[in-house]
Amino acid sequence: MGRGTVIPVLFVLAAGAGAVGRHVVGTLVCSWQALLVVNTLGSFLLGVLINSDLSTDAITVLGVGFCGALTTFSSFALETRSLGRLWGSAYAMLTVGCACAAAAIGMTMP
Amino acid sequence: MQLFPSEKVGLEPSVLLAVAAGGALGSLGRWGVAEVWFAETSEPSWEWPILLVNVIGSLAIGIAARHLVAGTVAWSFVVTGVLGGFTTFSAFAVALNDLADADRLEIAIAYGAVTLVAGIGAAWLAHPPERPSSTGPPSPRHDTTDGGTDNGWDGAP
């Protein structure tokens, strides 16, 4: 298997694992909590990755693949919409705040 | 609304496989969008690919939520897998940080606001929340279990 095939295969595995991770958290706690947890955790991990010494390929697999699939915007949008105007706004702000803070902390990690 | 099945159903191999396969497909799509979108500059800028996948995915999830039953294998494949993998929050959060770090705070705020309004708005438009009926008894056709089985408005005569 050449190098040109290895990265997409690893990407598929990483993305599949990320999506399964998000799903498993979703089966354990209620949806808004699950999405807040995975979106915050994935943002932290991506922050750590992009400031690491890893190669571009590794960041594609772990960052774009795993972190990208662990986090989600579409389910977040659907959940926020169902919370109504007040709670939806609060939830959106909470998620953006937690995810951005987590990414910022991740980006400053040595 | 409940977006994920119970632990008992959700950890069945068929469901996990559907999520993994869908997640891989959706993520490949997102990677593809990022690859074909030629970045003109390495400076932190308005991240069109992330905005694009997030808004399209949010529109699609609203449509999917009207036609699929939450917790089924089909739901897990399409909603949790494909659309969950196609859209991303981590790249969005990092993009906001990059813009803020590059002293482009006003662009960061605008980018965040546009993404939230367009994304949530797309999901809202594609799947408007049930309005509480103020007059008369609730219509039997009006399904109040949000996101559950289709309420019969589509294709109904």
Image (cartoon, coloured by chain):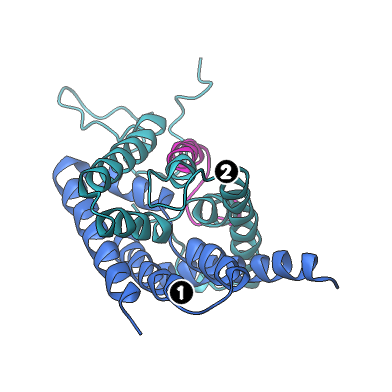
Residue range highlighted in magenta = B55-74
From this view, report whether residue B130 is shown above or below residue B73: above
Q: Is residue B61 magenta?
A: yes
Residue found at the very far bottom of the displayed protein: A110
Q: Nearer the viewer, residue B97 or A27?
A: B97
Residue B119, position in %: x, y?
Answer: 36, 40
At label 1, the amino acid type is Leu
Secondary structure type for disc 2 = loop
From this view, report whether residue B130 is shown above or below residue B74: above
Say the numbered circle drawn on residue B157: none
Query: What is the chain identity of the residue bearing mark 1?
Result: A
Residue B147, position in %: x, y?
Answer: 40, 44
At label 2, the amino acid type is Phe
When asked about the image quadrant of residue A12, the answer is bottom right
Residue count near mark 1 (Cα–Cα under 10 Å), binned few <14, some 14–19, many ≥20:
many
User: Is A108 left or right of A2, judged from the image as shown?
Assistant: left
User: Is A9 left or right of A60, judged from the image as shown?
Assistant: right
Q: Nearer the viewer, residue A92 or A27?
A: A92
Say the numbered circle drawn on residue B38: 2
Residue found at the very far right of the displayed protein: A1
Residue B123, position in %: x, y?
Answer: 38, 38
| Discs 2 and 1 lie in a common subunit | no
Q: Is residue B131 magenta?
A: no
Q: Which color is chain A depicted in? A: blue
Residue picked out by circle 1: A49
Q: Which color is chain B depicted in? A: cyan
